[in-house]
Image (tube, helix red, strand yellow):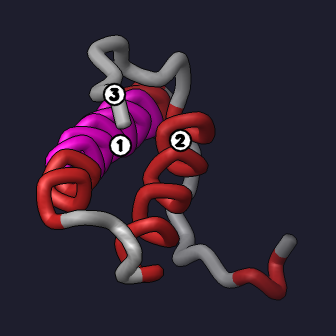
Amino acid sequence: MSKKSASPANFETALAELEQIVSRLESGELPLEDALNEFEQGVQLARQGQQKLQQAEQRVQILLDSDNDAPLTPFTPEAE
């Protein structure tokens, strides 16, 4: 299996690719070297995803900080 050098275009693509890697690793059918390559790719995708999430969180925080009159309330799914 060839190692991909380009990073996924967006968070959703990276997450889908990571899920596929996890499935292949969990199958237990990969030779050791292929499993290690898949694991390495998965770690890179997880780090990229974490970075994208942190960037999104910072953007949200900047938006909230710019409107000082906006009340902050805890998120609850029922409020949707």
User: In the figure, 37 relative to 48: above or below?
Assistant: below
What is the C-alpha distance between the residues marked 2 and 3?
Answer: 52 Å
What is the magenta range? 40-60
User: Residue 71's quadrant in the figure?
Assistant: bottom right
**Residue 9 image position (x, y, % from top left):** 53, 17
Task: State how many labels appear.
Answer: 3
Q: Is residue 27 magenta?
A: no
Other residues around mark 1 within 10 Å, as few (<14) / some (14–19) / many (≥20) = many
Mainly helix, strand or loop, the magenta region?
Answer: helix
Mark 2 vs mark 1: which is more N-terminal? Answer: 1
Q: Is residue 57 magenta?
A: yes
- Which residue has dot 3 on it? 2
Amino acid tagged 1 = Gly
**Residue 79 image position (x, y, % from top left):** 82, 78
**Residue 10 image position (x, y, % from top left):** 54, 25
Q: Is residue 76 visible?
A: yes
User: Residue 20's quadrant in the figure?
Assistant: bottom right
Other residues around mark 2 within 10 Å, as few (<14) / some (14–19) / many (≥20) = few
Q: Quadrant of the N terminus?
A: top left
Helix, strand or loop at mark 1: helix
